[in-house]
Image (spheres, grey):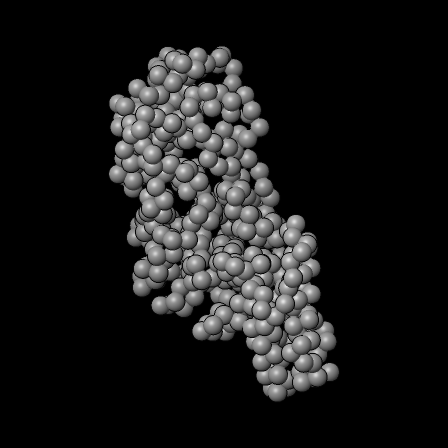
Amino acid sequence: MVGTQKGDFTLDHHPLLPGTPALGSVAVIPWDSATFGFTVGDYKLAERGHGTIDADTCCTLLEDWATANNCELISCDVPADHHDRIALLSSLGFVFVDFRLRVTLPQLRMTTLPGGRIPVRPAEQEDGADIERIARTAFHHGRYHADPRFPGVLADLRYQRWITNALTDPGLGEVVYVIGPPGSVRGFYHAVVTNGLAHLRLAAVDADSRGGIVGFNLYVGMLEVLREMGARQATGVISTANVEVMNVFGFLGFRFSHPEAEFHWHARQARHLIGGNKGGV
Amino acid sequence: MQGSDIGRDKLIEWIVGAVTDFRLTMTDDTEAHVEETTTLFGDEGILDSLGLVTVVLELEERVNATLTIPISIADERAISQRNSPFRTVGTLADYTWTLVNGAAGDG
């Protein structure tokens, strides 16, 4: 799997305390909140140079904001080498859930790809059920799946909704391709091409094909398609726990950059989280 | 050489060698014993996707170099099989044997 919706869409952050930028800013993540049936948010630490943070004050403000917004979970990403900020997040009650990397193939047009043996094809309406089934069952990585307090069924549902939206309401340059004949789809790939840059959003193969040749051919075939669509570069985001796909990216010539640590904060009275409503984390 | 000049045992030997080499390169597991019944992919498989692709490409190259028979093991026909030919060392050898002799017969 590649991709993170949070990284692909713009969030509307507001200062945690107006006039005090050092305390950072928060936003509701509307698409995930709509999928989960409860509010999840995103916290952005202040840029360095805004002074020190009083952790107790910040904790109180985060809890107040979460209560006011019925928010049960707040995420925060920080560059993996910002050790001071990682320590700060821990003092604020955030817990580490995942590491992720940006993957980039900078010269897609000039890259020699191994010949795809199994063709990919644009997804048709009749493929929808197979694609949604794969999306609902194939993913095991990413911050929601990595959070032991987050219900797996909701993390799965997020990917199903994601691909359903891509199939039913595709934007400009947005494509979903599949591998396998109609009635026997083995995997899918969702990507968006804008201004010559291919954003690799989501890819998965069914459980029976995991670890086989289908996944490799899906990645190769999709890159060939994206190149034909005019993409000069390809980029995406991947959990570092997903070493199988990272090895495929490495084999195909991708570069890795922008390591980030992902943290979650859980509300004390969270009703939907595992172990919730038991007095907090 | 012709397709019939190599036996299934030779294909097993090549596959076991390629799998063992990949395991030694990519994992810390130097004790794994690879044999005909070893599961290659899936929940109990000892290869990941890239590992299986690597082994298959090496097998194709050895067949081509030894028998001068170009075969394509990993293609649409392979994934459309009711039982995957990539399940075990033995099934991969069987499938490759079929391709080798089919290609030799065609030629």
Q: Quadrant of residue A143?
A: top left
The residue that appears at 58% across and 58% down in the rendered structure is B47
The answer to whether residue B42 of the structure is visible from this angle is yes
The residue that appears at 34% across and 17% down in the rendered structure is A61
x, y (%) of residue B79?
48, 69
The residue that appears at 61% across and 53% down in the rendered structure is A251
- Please tell me which residue lies in front, A188 or A104: A188
Question: In the image, A215: left or right of B63?
Answer: left
x, y (%) of residue A256?
58, 41
A255 above or below A38? Answer: below
Question: In the image, A232: left or right of A138?
Answer: right
The answer to whether residue A235 of the structure is visible from this angle is no
Q: Quadrant of residue A28?
A: top left
x, y (%) of residue A246?
56, 48
Q: Quadrant of residue A55?
A: top left
A46 above or below A169? Answer: above
- Please tell me which residue lies in front, B32 or A128: B32
